Image (cartoon, rainbow, N blue to C red):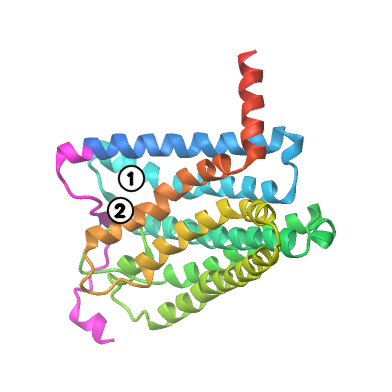
Amino acid sequence: MEKAEVRNQTPIVEFILLGFGNVPELQTLLFLVFLVIYIVTVSGNILFVALVVADQQLHIPMYFLLGNLSCLEICYTSTILPRLLASFLTGDRTISVKGCIVQLYFFGILSNTENLLLTAMSYDRYLAICNPLRYAALMNGRVCWQLVAGAWISSLLLCTIVNIFFFQLTFCDSKEIDHFFCDFSPMIKLSCVDTQTLELLTFIIAVIGTFVPFLLTLTSYICIITTILRIPSSIGRQKAFSTCSSHLIVLAVLYVTVLTVYVIPTANTPKVLQKIFSVFYTVLTPMINPVIYSLRNKEVKESLRKAILKLVS
């Protein structure tokens, strides 16, 4: 209650996202850069989904999960970039409190779903390398659909619980959010009511939605690497590792940036540095994921080559 007493109790109805400063020349440059990134991200992921759907050779569990991940990346980047691009173009940085909470809601659902889909993909690679004889039975079409549906439904339920509490908050004193999108930590600081229950609930859900999938993924890759090291021939080891190397790269980029933004920061960490790392996992990762999977998978490159030749002919 002390927090509520020392602040101005006039509720606010909109926030101001400070973004990346207010230099006019910089805003134009940033608009062009983020517009190109958004176009490349959406078109690249749509192309990847189209290849997976059109090519029968890609109708296997790994590419089914990758296709779902690409669909998610399109939604993920679309929750942030259109609003950011509009602010660059018009100079209007205001967003309603309800709009901000809705953006945070969808961002949370998509972030959690991405973690769970990447965990499902690590489970797929674990079965393919560590239990190849049982792979076809354990990773059939029904299991794939269950994994994808489970990722979406569980994320939706967890984030809905948080959002119910979030909509009950009132915000006062300051309208400014020193970020380029509505994230949990900057928003919770502007609340003029007690948020301990919500913060505890969010921490528990973050552990369930992020830390548990991380541990499962880590366990899968410990087993995968152990199995690969037991393969007697170097060619066999290289071939086995190549089937999961692209997924490992994506995991490394995602978890390094997320840990840098949410776990490591201290009071002395510059805001600009936090924003840069936030750009990596919210904007750049959805763009580079289809590139990584396309360049490091022979099946995708072959499918892309066939599609280009078909269009040319």
Q: What element does badge 1 sit on?
A: helix
Does 9 lie within the magenta span?
yes
Which region of the structure is painted magenta? Answer: 1-27
Residue 247, placed above or below residue 158:
above
Q: Secondary structure at mark 2?
A: loop
Residue linked to disc 2: 180
Quarter of the picture holding the N terminus: bottom left
* Circle on res. 4: none
Q: Quadrant of residue 275?
A: bottom left
In this orientation, does residue 302 appear? yes
Q: Which of disc 1 and disc 2 is earlier in sequence?
A: 1
Residue 90 drawn above or below residue 281: above
Give the Cα separation between the discs numbered 2 and 1. 7 Å
Residue at the image point whose x is 25% and y is 55% from the top:
16
| Quarter occupied by residue 130 | bottom right
**Mark 1 neighbour density, 10 Å: few (under 14) some (14–19) many (20 or more):** many
Q: Nearer the viewer, residue 181 or 6?
A: 181
Residue 237: x percent and y percent? 66, 57
Mark 2: amino acid: Phe
Q: Nearer the viewer, residue 135 or 104?
A: 135
Residue in the foreground of this view, choosing between 141 and 201? 141
Q: Amino acid at mark 1?
A: Leu
Tell me residue 6's x, y (percent).
18, 81
| Within-10-Å neighbours for mark 2: few <14, some 14–19, many 20+ | many
Q: Locate residue 74 relative to residue 126 in the image: left or right.
A: left
The residue that disc 1 covers is 84
Residue at 64% x, 19% y: name it: 309
Please give left or right for residue 203 compared with residue 58 in the image: left
Task: Report if the CB atoms under discs 2 and 1 are less than 8 Å apart.
Answer: yes
